[in-house]
Image (spheres, grey):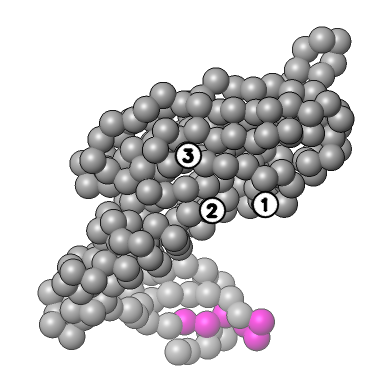
Amino acid sequence: MATLKGLIKIEGTLDGLTFYKGKNGYFIRTKGGISKKRIQNDPAFIRTRENANEFGLAATAGKILRRALSVLFCNSKDNSLPSRLMSTMMLIKNQDTISPRGQRSPAVGLTTPGGKVLLQNFDCNENAILAQVLRADYTVNTTTGEISIPDFIPGTQLVAPLGATHVTLQSAFLNLDFTTEVRDLQLSDPVNLPINLTPDNVTLAPAAVTGTGITMILLQLSFFQEMNGVQYHLNNGAFNTLNIVRVI
């Protein structure tokens, strides 16, 4: 690395030399790093190639799930969702104990009990964690996908955001093949309730799903503010929850 002492002040790369400004002046360094071709072909970088391939498989799995649930994600997600889901998929691929190194995938990892546990209870909106928002007990029928909340009192069993007057509850039943990307998503009828002290028996019953992939059951809570008889999404859904309550 050299220090530039002349009058010419350049920042950027020119003919393999990088010019940049530090706190003590302008500096020059030669272009470094390892070429892409070497990483792809040099036996010394086999572990790097294996890690990169598994990273790509995890990224693809996260994208497949986000695409399958896009109708729900549009109102219940945060900016960190892709990276958080990617991190979870990286953990899930570690549950794949049958594929060779470099080919371990979330698709195989999710067929194991350990892989299912890692995805279960995943919150799609980190700003609205289901366990912190919903204080009522609920049951999940893993055969039918039905979610039941008996004697639900929104006024006391919800930690609702300021300004919310109503809540809509909806469940989703998903069968997703992470290899073929074939999916079947069924949504229950939404149940809209005022946030008051009136108890209600809530039953969310989606239609049955078909397929040979991984089955998931999700619960979504969406908050609204009523004005002049019209309900509006509160803060564009910033406080809505979406949680993968079961992975089967």
| Between discs 1 and 3, the one toward the N terminus | 1
Residue at 80 percent of width and 23 percent of height: 194
Q: Where in the figure is residue 137, as x and y percent of width and height? A: 67, 45
| Cα distance in 3D space between marks 3 and 2 | 16 Å
Residue 20 located left or right of residue 143: right
Q: Residues within 10 Å of mark 2 (few under 14, many from 20)?
A: some
Q: Position of residue 226 (x, y in %)?
A: 82, 19
Secondary structure of the residue carrying tag 3 is loop
Question: What kind of residue is marked 2?
Answer: Asn
Do tag 1 and tag 3 residues touch (Cβ < 8 Å)?
no
Extreme residue in the top direction: 229
The CA span between labels 1 and 3 is: 19 Å
* Residue 136 visible in the picture: yes
From the image, which quarter does the N terminus lie in?
Answer: bottom left
Of residue 85 and residue 186, the one placed in the foreground of this image is 186
Amino acid type at circle 1 is Ala
Q: Secondary structure at mark 2?
A: loop
The residue sitting at 33% across, 51% down in the picture is: 61
Range shown magenta: 23-28
Q: Depth check: 57 or 160 in front?
A: 160
Q: Say whether residue 26 is magenta.
A: yes
To which residue does mark 2 refer? 121
The answer to whether the residue labelled 3 contacts the one labelled 2, judged by CB atoms less than 8 Å apart, is no
Whichever of callouts 1 and 2 sits on the residue coming sooner in the sequence is 2
The reply to whether the magenta stretch includes residue 71 is no
Instruction: Describe residue 234's horizontal placement relative to residue 107 as left or right.
Output: right
The residue beneath circle 1 is 131
**Distance from label 1 to label 2 (Cα)?**
9 Å
